[in-house]
Image: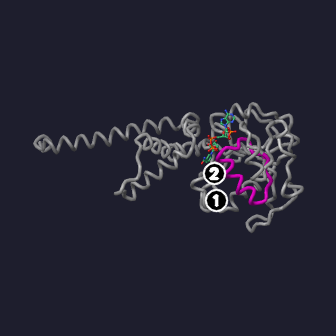
Amino acid sequence: HLSPPVSLCLSASLCTMSTPSSSSARSLKIGVVGLGPFAQFLSKTILKQGHAITATSRTDYSHICSHLDISFYRDMGEFFEADNDVILICTSILSLADVVKSMPFHRLKRPTLFVDVLSIKEHPREVLLQVLPPESDVLCTHPMFGPQSGRDGWEGLTFVYDRVRIREEAVCSSFLHIFESEGCKMLELSCEEHDKLAARSQFLSHTIGRILSEMEIGSTSIDTKNFQTLVKLKDSTMEDSFDLFSGLFIYNRFAQQEMMNLEVAFGKVKQKLVDRMNEESNPSVSNQ
Ligand code: NAP
């Protein structure tokens, strides 16, 4: 790995951040696990705010990290010894359980806040409570935006969180402040409530985007605004990995029902059209 982390603030835990809404928010040392597209996107804003980042990942991101001012550790044990305030878990939904179970918790130097950003919430809550040492705090979160929708800033975008097990308030509120101070709409919601809502919103939009992609839709010379919206939905959905999409289905217990609702609704709409077509082609039957 690269040389030991050079924190932007020499003693990260002692520095205070001077932002208008929270005078007590402090600079954090954040260790990212899983430096894929979403973690890289988050890291840019976190660094801009003056926090220090270390990272580890399955893939070697040393090169990207040297450009981003992130200290990259190939070895998870050395990463755990880097004395982070927060471990920010950004791995895929499918790999979460294996990644967390492989963590060498005995190498942590002190109780640490574990935060996840997975797009489903009951599953990480369960895994983290089962596997983490009891002295570790747990904050489950879902930023309801990504590299596309958050490209021009996070103002007005929703940040969902559940304080699953928090004793060290200062670290937790400093972490939440990262999103507050960017203007996110902060929404405290239980993991169960999040998953219910997300199955009807995010999972549904991803599924429809994937269906549109299977149909290979694309812009035409006579696009309506509504059709342009569909093309955008297809394009932005396909930016996310299939791992992410399948995670939304496999690890959200409410998603299967929504998939069935979609199939039933499609059948009903189709049936209404077939009924009307039959009426039109045979008016005497429908007038009886
Ligand atoms: P993703 O495909 O969901 O996850 C990619 C990350 O998972 C990479 O860091 C990858 O590591 C790691 N990973 C995958 N399989 C692994 C395995 N078998 N063992 C260890 N690590 C593995 O893509 P993403 O968009 O970056 O999303 C990351 C997380 O953020 C997901 O949990 C997702 O639900 C959540 N999230 C994403 C968005 C978004 O807009 N994309 C928004 C909110 C939340 P390597 O890169 O090292 O291979």
Seen in the image, is 226 located left or right of residue 62? Answer: left
Extreme-bottom residue of the structure: 20
**Residue 170 appearing in the image:** no
Name the residue tied to disc 2.
143
Q: Which residues are magenta?
A: 31-54
Above or below for 49 versus 272: below
Residue at 51% of width from left, 38% of height from top? Answer: 255
Quarter, ligand 1: top right
For label 2, the SS is: strand
Residue 122 falls in which quadrant of the image? top right
Above or below for 54 versus 92: below
Question: 10 Å neighbourhood of mark 2: few (<14), some, or many (≥20)?
Answer: many
Residue 218, position as x, y percentages in the image: 41, 49
* Distance in Å between CA atoms under marks 1 and 2: 9 Å
Extreme-left residue of the structure: 284
Residue at 37% of width from left, 41% of height from top? Answer: 265
Residue 156, position as x, y percentages in the image: 60, 61
Q: In terms of depth relative to the viewer, which is nearer, 90 or 213?
A: 213
Q: In terms of depth relative to the viewer, which is nearer, 86 or 75?
A: 75
* Residue 76 is covered by the magenta coloring: no
Seen in the image, is 78 located left or right of residue 217? Answer: right
Residue 148, position as x, y percentages in the image: 57, 53
Question: 10 Å neighbourhood of mark 1: few (<14), some, or many (≥20)?
Answer: many
For label 1, the SS is: loop
Labels 1 and 2: the sequence-earlier one: 2
Question: Pointers 1 and 2 in contact (CB under 8 A)?
Answer: yes
Give the number of marks. 2
For the residue with label 2, is its CB less than 8 Å from the closest atom of ligand 1? yes
Residue at 64% of width from left, 59% of height from top? Answer: 184
Q: Disc 2 residue type?
A: Pro
Q: Disc 1 residue type?
A: Cys
Name the residue tied to disc 1.
184
